[in-house]
Image (spheres, grey):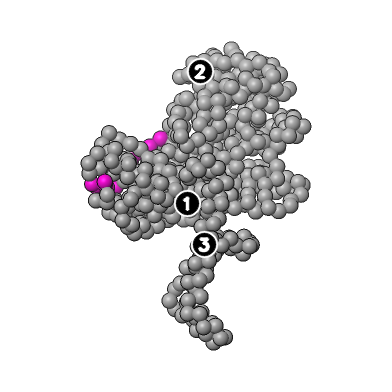
Amino acid sequence: MKIPRRLDEILPAAAMEKFLDVLQQPDISGKVREALHRVGLQDNSPLDKVKEAWQQARSWLDTLSANTANPDGEPLTLNASGQLLSSSLREIPLAPAVAYGYAKAATHYQTAASVDQKATTAVEHLLGRHASTWLGSTAEALRLLASGDGSRAGVVLSRVDAVNIAGVGNIHAMLSAGKNSLREIGAANGVSASDWQQAVVEPGQCVVLSSPNSLSLSDAARHRSQAIEAAHKVGAKVVEVLADGVLSSELVSRYGFPDVRHCLNHGADVVIWPLHLLLGGPSGALVIGDSELIAAVARSAESSGLLLAGANLSAATLALQLASVQHDVPSQDAHAGTAAQLLSNPENLKNRARRLAVQLSGVGEIAQAVEFELETPLGPSPWNRYRLQSWGVRLVPKNSLDELLRQVVLGEAKIGRKLELVREEHALLLNLRFISPEHDHELVQTLTGPTDEIEPAESSST
């Protein structure tokens, strides 16, 4: 295989592929060939050679990136489970546009001042004029807040909020790493107003809330109000971890996710917003709110080398900026990331499921493939408070489920992909919610295993 001398000549991939698509239109390609002939070039298939060179370069780049991302040969995964997070899928991919921005920032020099200024401007534009700082993780943000003067009289954490959040970690363990005392109150199923009043008694205390927690949405709202009222009555501070925080009014109304701006303006003194979950950014956390608390955290983080910087901060800023552009308009671009997938049009999912069902029925060990509507939790507890309506395909085996699974395993080996799906007693379930339309053909290839190739489903917008 030939290796291109200059990678920048074949990037960006999306632009090159659109260029090829245009050139392969008969009326345009004919004019290109005519022009080449007039200037003395006799090659009858220049477009084929361009396409062949491009495919060769893409193949080499795919191999290189796969080996880099998966040094042990572990294949990349198609998530047909319908859950954003699970016991086996603990990380959410970067939004492709953010990944591109990260790569661009990482391959160029940038002054720290310019990167910081862009980040500050983005925060002020989208969240208001609050003090803010960017840290490498939620754990470090909580540890620093639980070690500073703002919590000198101790941290108060309800058992409702002492949860292990997939994608973030254990809130209680993070706070336990702080220097100041930690007091747990209430029970896992709720905390009374009197519990808060007895525990939060002086200004130097800090109350920590988390979302999602172990309560339902309605109970969580009452729980939050009681905690904030008790804290502010005595001058204590409230820190809120918003693992499920968003900026999209559509996501707020459809699922009940907390709006970060609303939380900042209605009770929270400090919000810790993980960047790598619904925002689609890199690992890290935006810490925003009370100027004195933020300044103290920023000083400690800077002296300890914990601040987000460079390409990571550039990518985080881009993710925040894209939130204002994409989140309230369901994108038709597969590069929009998690928010667009959560806002997918159910009719588009239904149409994709129907086409896939037609293509897969009767192939190999698949006796029947039927499209169906389903509801799944966003992830394990406490993410399971959020339910997603979706469409998928139920695969019924000809002989046995084990034989069908064997066909899937062979298909995974054939295309170098791992398929995360749901196994029922007598069928396999494929949920399309978190599979981009552009990957439908890989889904088909994986499921058909060693059987003859069939045409991939037409892609439709999400």
Residue bearing the label numbered 3: 56
Asked whether the viewer can see residue 232, the reply is no
Predominant secondary structure in magenta?
strand
The amino acid type, in three-letter code, at marker 2 is Val
Residue bearing the label numbered 1: 330
The one of 140 and 145 positioned closer to us in this rendering: 140
Residue that extends furthest to the top in the rendered view of this protein: 198
Q: Are marks 3 and 1 in contact (CB under 8 Å)?
A: no
Asked whether the viewer can see residue 164, the reply is yes
In the figure, is residue 314 to the left or right of 56? right
Query: How far across and down, in percent of the image, does residue 148 sit?
Result: 72, 23
The one of 366 and 172 positioned closer to us in this rendering: 366
Q: If you read the primary sequence from the N terminus, does the residue marked by circle 2 or circle 3 appear first?
A: 3
**Helix, strand or loop at disc 1?**
loop
In the figure, is residue 406 to the left or right of 91? left
Residue bearing the label numbered 2: 191
Look at discs 2 and 3 and give the one toward the viewer.
3
